[in-house]
Image: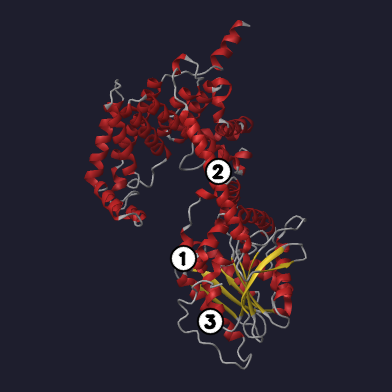
Amino acid sequence: MRFPRQLASAVFSPLPVSRSRAIAVSERLAAATTLTSSLEYLTQHKERETGGFNDWNVVKDGQAGAAPLTRRLLDAVSGRRSTTALHVARAAVSAGMLLPGSSRWRGAGNLFLGASTALLYPRHRYGTDGSDQVSTLVQSATAVARLSGNTAVQDAALWYVALQGNLSYVVSGWVKLLGDSWRDASALPGVMRTRTYGCEPAFRIARKYPVPARYLTHGVLALECLFPAAYLFGGRLARPVIASAGAFHLANGFAMGLGRFVTSFVAMHPAVAYTSAPGSHPAVAGRDDRMLKVVGGALAAAAASAGATAVQRRLRVREGWPTSAHVTTRAGNRLQYEIMAHGRADKPFVVFCAGLGTTSEQWSWITESLARGTEYGVLTYARAGYAGSEYRSTAPYRLTESVDDLVDLVENVVPEGRTVLLVGHSLGGELCRRAAVRLGDRTHGVAYLDSAHPMELNRSDQQSKSAKLLPDSLNIMDWSLRLGLGALIARPDWLGQLPQNYQERAFAQFADARAWKAARREWAAVEEDFRGHDGELEAIDAHALVVSAQQTTDRDPEQLLMHNELGTAHQGEGNRVESVVVEGADHGELLMSSEHGLRVASRIAEFLDATTEGDGDGPPQERNGVKGTAQGRKR
């Protein structure tokens, strides 16, 4: 019994590392990462030449939005000679950092290596990975520790590295946990079979022995999610946790070719060992732990601020516009809608149905243009769960529920006797198609804007592959926002394309967990419905306008064929069917870009004029100069 006790004591005991030792080991491991990195870039110089993967003449376009001084600095270090000279200097300094010593000059070396890595990051934008970022983090902290000489500052720097190390594992683990592939253990063989990071022998072993591969996958997941367990029980779990993490990186370096990850991430482990040891241990005597309290206080303040931000956004999302109204559908859902224009009593209403994860604000260029410049009624709404609409149904969600909601909206809100042109983007197009059948004579027509097709997951390889990745993305957004991380979310580029008065409300909806929860619910039903579709499209006795984004059809020609089929389903006596491809537009820009959105609005107006010719006695309103009409609501 003596040996097992000794073994358990050796394994489950703190890993005491002194302050000076932790700094020394961390900076040398980070220097090894930088040395390897610069030697790799020096030997792969062809990638930086004209036409190469990191040709600066192309890569620098990614810095177009940077400040002029920043762009000039990057240009100065991105020439062939200057980049080579900088890497040679980095290699020399890194090699020197591997030598024995503990002088403050090593702080200057760490500072140079960290700063140069950050400076070269845009230069090597393609191919730069997390190892360079981690080495910059470690070198910045060890530079502060070396240059200061104050033990309190050194301890703060080591706590910073340790906390960042814990964060890197925990975030990675919990993000993986949201993906089906890690929960069902298909991630490991899936990665091992890829061309970029794959390893054929490892893939064959994982496929031959699925049970051990499943345990290994779940073990990695547990290690990352529970990495802070190294601090439990007075640091008694530090040895197995740090050893497991080191073995994990060694395996990645061997199987996936991520050699730099070994030295870069392991460079954070000495700080974890130093900070996880109990303060009473002689090796860490006098350790200053105030940094932990400061971080805890900052996190509490950040959490309170994030909560307040989330509440403010939720209130903005749910209140709608001053003219918003509500209707309750047969499923019990409470839909928020806006009548932007009533139009002439003898003209159709244009009803807009958004795509997956989007709301009516993203239609603003089109809806404002039609509301201000035509005689037609304009109605927008948010599906159940989005914006101010409430999802109250108790039955399992199916796409037919959203179709029922749309039909109920039309029958309860659009004045009796007036027909409707249903306009749907993406998934909204398919919902409009199904609602048009149900509405019968009330359907004047359907306008499909880069619409979904019920057979797209079965006929389009691209759509099928994208569909498999979408649930993980929706899960990550949903749970991240539920956990209050919306305060950290970046404003998407498309937001700046919308009219100014719509941007804040659109962003509030984008950063609200309700929208992503609704998108998850809808996507699960879409995938089940589309993959089981028999391929037949019901005939619709109404007009049809089919608008496709050029980038969509160029990327996947099968989409154009399916879009044409949507129009064909409307062919019948007296029905007008038009198809148009909007040059230069992509799936989202079709709505959100002022250029493309106003073109689409004009095309919808022309289509309505052509299909309602002779209706009413009033003169048509002038539509010259449509550009610039969508300036946002003044309510």
Give neighbour class at mark 1: few <14, some 14-19, many 20+ (Cα, 10 Å). some
Q: Residue 455: where, in percent of width, then height?
A: 64, 62
In the current view of this chain or complex, which residue is farthest to the bottom? 617
Residue located at (42% from left, 19% from top) = 18
Quarter holding the C terminus is: bottom right
Residue located at (48% from left, 56% from top) = 491
User: Disc 3 versus disc 2: distance between alpha carbons?
Assistant: 46 Å
For disc 3, the marked residue is 373
- Residue 55 located left or right of residue 267: left
445, 303: nearer the viewer: 303
Residue located at (50% from left, 28% from top) = 245
Quarter holding the N terminus is: top right
- Residue 593 located left or right of residue 12: left
Q: Is mark 2 on a helix, strand or loop?
A: helix
For disc 1, the marked residue is 497
**Colour logic:** secondary structure
Looking at the image, do the residues carrying marks 3 and 2 touch, with CB atoms under 8 Å apart?
Answer: no
Give neighbour class at mark 2: few <14, some 14-19, many 20+ (Cα, 10 Å). some
Counting residues from the start of the chain, the first of labels 1 and 2 encountered is 2
33, 564: nearer the viewer: 33
Q: Is mark 3 on a helix, strand or loop?
A: helix
Q: What residue type is labelled 2?
A: Ala
Above or below, comparing residue 614 to residue 625 in the picture: below
User: Disc 3 versus disc 1: distance between alpha carbons?
Assistant: 21 Å
Q: Residue 96: where, in percent of width, then height?
A: 27, 26
Residue located at (55% from left, 64% from top) = 558
Is residue 247 at all visible to an observer of this figure? yes
Tag on residue 303? 2
